[in-house]
Every structure is written in structure tokens, then in C-alpha cells.
Image (tube, rainbow, N blue to C red):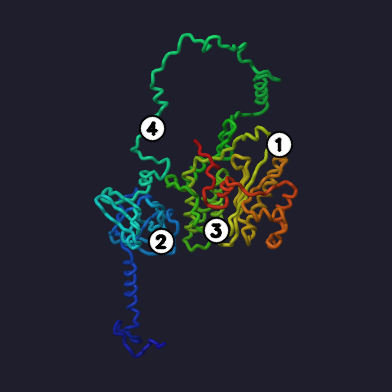
Amino acid sequence: MKCWWRPDIKCRKCGNMGHMERVCKSQQPEASKAQTEEDEEQLFVVTCFASKNNSSESWLIDSGCTNHMTNNLAIFIEIDMSFISNVRIGNGQLIPVKGKGIVAIESLSGLKHIYDVLYVPDIDQNLLSVGQLLEKDYKVIFDDKWCFIKDALGKDVFMVMMKAKSFSLNLLEDEQRNDYVKGVPLLEEKLADCVACQYGKQIRKPFPQTTWRASHKLQLVHSDVGGPQRTSSLNGSDEKPVNVFKADMFKTFEMTYLGLLSYFLGMEVKQGTGEVFICQQKFAKEILKKFHMEDCKEISTPMNLKEILSKEDGAEKVDEGLYRSLIGCLMYLTATRPDITFVVSLLSRFMNCASKIHFVAAKRVLRYVKGTTDYDIKYSVLYNFQLQGCHNFQFQGFSDSDWAGSIDDMRSTTGYCFSFGSGAFSWSSKKQDVVAQSTAKAKFIAANAAVNQAIWIRKILEDLHMKQTEPTEIFVDNQTTIAISKDPVFHGKTKHFNIRLYHLREKQKDGEINSGVGRRRWRRRVAFLCSGGDGEKTEHHQND
């Protein structure tokens, strides 16, 4: 390489000695400025910021926009947060682009994936670029007051009517118009007539003064000899002894009659005939108010199943105190909300390294809680319990696992729940202590944890004089795990198993536990403990 230093040469650019003009440093700021201008001209968008009430479900078809854009991070099914760029708007201002990904939109011909959609947080309207649609072989036709978007085969994808001199694609209105969603009728449709109201407005005929008990001649009529009699018992139904006992207790002790239990440790308890509802509706609303999410948009799932959370995600760090406070509130909410147990357990792993991605995932849980504040757990007296009594009634359990769900240490997640047949009364979602080398081992570890919990529950029921005479059924959705727990011939596949895991086989041999294949309804009930879905809808009951 030839050295650029020339002590006897004078630069024609800056007039200094020692270098030539082609290596003069005074040219670099201009080059940097040119590069910046070139980057700034990468994108160009024409839009405005006048409206502040635009829905995240509405898309504006823009012929002057070079790329699809949205400000709603939740609608992405895949997103690359490492894509950083700038967008120039109509007034010349540059706004940042924080990512690029894929968005799924429901169309006339099914679910369509819109690729290369930019995530622009500062924009106020979702934009569909006409130019980018044409690049993907779509056809955009403007006819009268309609805009038709067709695919490469000529099938209609979207039909958008012009409103206020613009073409705005509102997915909710399209679903109402085409009856895609049940329970969302059009407002202009005529409602069904109320039959009860019509009967209430009719003129009532007077009752006859006299009537005959027999309906025809010589009919055999059975007459009552006596009226209703009080049922005799040992002490009768006299409340006097009870009142005397209460008066004596009030004289001896300071007592207050509280009536039926309504609150217990912050949980709301509602009792009915043969059923009890437990919820934390008031506490859920307090959490939303504390983190300024009272007016947030509701969402149907607590987390995005395709989003993988990691400790080193490269995102900007957030206030750890605020993040810990949010996770702590959600942990207390899991006392009556098993549907958020998995995602809260997952987010609690990042308390010492919380980033913006983790905080957005936690706020998504709040959006899910916003739409399900009136959910509660229902415990009811079953028919078999009334017939057999508490001594012959059995509880059941189900275990599952999420194999290698943590990408930081490749450990799996254990999930299990127990129930007498109504609402679940015991559940857990916890990361395993060891790395499972196979799905069978992960399922075996989860089943072993469920066995330990079942034995503990059996001992408590025995203290309550509800001893379990039959083995407790624990359903496992893995045939290999069930075979290993019953037959030790699979020694070649279990060499890497820990010795303590064979506790399941021992308890099954003793007749305390019986493992089997889980039924479909139990698989749905435990799904929310090992995944981010909403699980079994009937596990919670909406409070009317």
C-alpha cells in the first residue's frame, strides 16, 4: 500500500502541506452529508396527522405511499425489529421506522399475508401502498366510488367504498356486512320482536267466579285429607336455642356477624345454591388504573405464540422497578386466573434484564386482562359427589410440558392442574431444573411433578376425612412416558433420566397414582399452563 504522506506537497483543497487533495479530510463531511441525504430519500410517504381516533383495524389505500405502514405492533405475526430506517412525510419531516414484518388481514377470499409492512410508531393511520400491491401482482381498480383489489388470478380480495374522498378499508365493518363474526349484527337490521312484551300488552281475561274440579262426568276425584304439615325432627325447627347460644357468645366474646363470605385476601367470593364463584375483578381494574391501561384496546390472547423472548434481545432496556411492579401485580392475579399463569411465569424470568420487548409483552397481558376482568372460576357440587359422598369421590390431574421453550438455557416448562370435575383448584407452570434431552423426558419430569402434588393433596384430604381409596388419575398426552412409568424395559431410552424421576413408577406400583392418556377436554384445560394461548374457554365463567 502506497503511503499518502507527502511532506513536500501542498493540498489544493485546504492549502495545507503534507497531503494531496484526493485524501484531504475536508471532503468527508460533504460525503457524509450526501450519504445522509441519500438515506433520507430512501422512503417517501404522503399522509397527515389530523385524525387522532383512527382504529387499528382500518387501512387507508394510498397511491402516494411507497410502502405498507402501520403503528400497531400487536397485529404483526412476524417482525424484524433490527430493520431501522426513516420515512419522509408530506411536510418534509422524517419519522423513524422501527421494524419490518408480515401482517395478516382477513379478506374476501380468506386470510391474506401482507409482506414488507413497516412498523412506524409515530404515524396515525395504517397505510396500504398501491405501488407495493402492484409489485406483488395484485390489481387495483378504481371504479366510480369503489376500489377493487384483485389477486393474480382475478379473484376479489377487497372491495372498498369511498368515504370522505378516501378509500378506507375497515375490517370490522366488512365482517359485519358479510356475517363473518357471530354476534356482531348490523345496526340497521330490524331486531326480532319480543314475544314476552307482546303478551304483556294484551288484555287479560278475568278469572271465572266458579269452576269445577272434574273435567267430565263421573270422573274420580282425589281430595286432600289435610294440608302441608311441618316435618318432625329431633329438635324441630325452633330457632330459640340458636338465638340463646348467640346471645351467650356475645356476652362472653366480642363478636360481629359478617354474613356470607364476600371477600377473602383480596379475592371476591360469590356464593349460590350449590356453587361458588371466585374472582379478582376489582384488583384487575386497579392494576389497569395503576399502569394507565384503563382505556387500552382489548385482545383475545395473553401473548403472541410466534414471539420468542430472550434475555439478550438487543432491545432498549426499560425501568426495572416499573417492570417488577407490573409482574408482581400479575403474579398475585394468577391466584384466580390460571389462563395467564404461563405468560406471567415466562415474563418473570427477565426481571433483572427487562427490555422494551419484554415490557410490550407484559402490556399485552394487561390488554388481555382488560377484556376478561369479569372472568371467574366456578366450583359446583357434582351429581356423583351427591350420590357417592366425599369418601368415594376422586380428583383428577393432567400434566404437560413445553419442550425446550427457553432459548437462553434450552430448558422445558412443566405444567399441571387438578380438579374434582368443576373448576381447577390447583395449578402450576414452572421452568424445569434440568435440560430435557427428549420430549419424553420433559413429559416424564412434568408427570413426576404432578405426582408429588397429587400425593400432597391426598394427604390433605385424608386430614379432612376425605381419604382417597382409589388411585388418583393423572393424564399424560405422551405414550412413551406412560410406557416408561409402567414397564422398565425401555432402559435404552432412559439412561439419561435422573434417579429421582422414577418416583412416578414407584407410586404407580403402590396404587396411589394411575397414569393414562389425557382426554381432549383435559388437554385444552392444561394448554394455557404450557403455552401462551387462552386455553379452555370453559375453565372460566363470565360473571353476569
Regarding residue 36, the answer to whether it shows in the image is yes
Quarter of the picture containing the N terminus is bottom left
Q: Report the disc number at residue 391.
A: 1
Q: Amino acid at mark 3?
A: Asn
**Viewer-proximal residue among 434 and 296:** 434
Label 4–label 2 contact, CB within 8 A: no
Q: Residue at x 32, y 53 (%)?
A: 60
Q: Earlier in the sequence, mark 3 or mark 2?
A: 2
Residue 157 percent across, percent down from the top left = 35, 53
Q: Which residue is mark 4?
A: 192
Q: Which residue is mark 3?
A: 352
Q: Which residue is mark 2?
A: 100
Q: Earlier in the sequence, mark 3 or mark 4?
A: 4
Where disc 4 sits, the SS reads: loop
- Density class for disc 4 (Cα within 10 Å; few <14, some 14-19, many ≥20) is few
> In this view, which residue lies farthest toward the right?
510
Label 3–label 1 contact, CB within 8 A: no
Label 1–label 4 contact, CB within 8 A: no
Q: Amino acid at mark 2?
A: Lys
Where disc 2 sits, the SS reads: strand
Q: Earlier in the sequence, mark 1 or mark 4?
A: 4
Q: Earlier in the sequence, mark 4 or mark 2?
A: 2
Where disc 3 sits, the SS reads: loop
Q: CA distance from mark 3 to mark 1?
A: 48 Å
Q: Quadrant of residue 17?
A: bottom left
> In this view, which residue lies farthest toward the left?
144
Tell which tag, 3 or 1, sits nearer the viewer.
1
Q: Earlier in the sequence, mark 1 or mark 2?
A: 2
Q: CA distance from mark 1 to mark 4?
A: 51 Å
- Density class for disc 3 (Cα within 10 Å; few <14, some 14-19, many ≥20) is few
Tell which tag, 1 or 4, sits nearer the viewer.
4
